DNA sequence: GTCATGTGTCAGTCTCAACTTACATACTCC
DNA sequence: GGAGTATGTAAGTTGAGACTGACACATGAC
């Protein structure tokens, strides 16, 4: 894991509302509007948080058609378990310095 | 661990320069100025980062008098190992809701 | 048709962390 | 007395993330 990835994860975790959202999803999948009501936050705001969580790979979302034809978007937890210790950190930072020549993606060959 | 504590830790970790500082300190203790030179960042800026790390309990700093009478401040790693998984998060969030009556310090009676 | 529900997004505002520059102090060596 | 190095801090700028409000669209029920 590069420090880039590690920081993406840490940034995703590092907010109270997102921790609460993850905790809610621990019970099972839930649709956005329902989750917004439970967390008592505006839907656009929750939407932003969920996007961030999804980008980090901590949750997954997918649209579904309900019986009535209405489209509902459900989010559910993705499994994760990050050990935050000095070994993880030095490893991540080391990968950066190793790849400092091609820190930008691409140039694989 | 409350979510307050968890967020403090996550915020402390969640910055590239602080990860680099932690990685440097993995080799052993170091004084501020030396560390600033190695990381190629301004001393006040590093100072701020170290304060944040110290507040989260990830590093410890202490002044020392060098032979020449000069005061040097050394920082060294504190042991830490946080498992970032859904159990940790739900536990932290649960502690918040338990104490939601007196989330603010004080007002005990 | 209107009303209620759902999703998706945009244009703003606002707060705070990050960062720079500058200052003060203390010590050593010349 | 400098000049050099160290710590500690304060004032100011800046940029990103958090947040609100409003809009668009679709569907079902009345």
Image (cartoon, coloured by chain):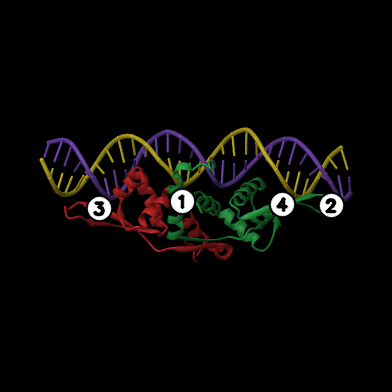
Chain colours: A green, B red, C yellow, D purple
Q: Where in the figure is residue C18, as x and y percent of width and height?
A: 43, 44
Q: Where in the figure is residue B83, as x and y percent of width and height?
A: 51, 63
Q: Note whether B99 is above or below C5 in the view shown.
A: below
The residue wearing badge 3 is B72
* Chain of the residue under the numbered disc 2 shown in the image: A
Q: Determine the CA span between mark 2 and mark 3.
A: 71 Å
Closer-to-camera residue (A19/B102): A19
Counting labels gives 4
The part of the image, by quadrant, that contains residue B63 is bottom left
The residue wearing badge 2 is A68
Under circle 1, the secondary element is helix
Q: Residue reaching furthest front?
A: A109
Q: Nearer the viewer, mark 3 or mark 4?
A: 4
Q: Where in the figure is residue B80, as x and y percent of width and height?
A: 43, 63
Q: Determine the CA span between mark 1 and mark 2.
A: 51 Å
Q: Is residue A16 left or right of residue B58?
A: right
The residue wearing badge 4 is A62
The residue sitting at 43% across, 52% down in the picture is: A94
Closer-to-camera residue (B2/B65): B65
The residue wearing badge 1 is A95
């Amino acid at each position: 894991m590069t420090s880039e990835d590690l920081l993406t994860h840490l940034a995703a975790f590092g907010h109270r509302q997102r921790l609460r959202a993850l905790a809610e999803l621990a019970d099972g999948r839930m649709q956005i509007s329902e989750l917004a009501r439970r967390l008592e936050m505006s839907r656009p705001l929750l939407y932003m948080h969920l996007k961030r969580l999804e980008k980090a790979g901590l949750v997954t979302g997918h649209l579904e058609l309900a019986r009535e034809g209405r489209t509902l978007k459900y989010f559910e937890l993705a499994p994760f378990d990050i050990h935050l210790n000095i070994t993880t950190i030095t490893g991540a930072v080391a990968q950066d310095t190793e790849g400092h020549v091609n820190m930008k993606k691409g140039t694989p060959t």
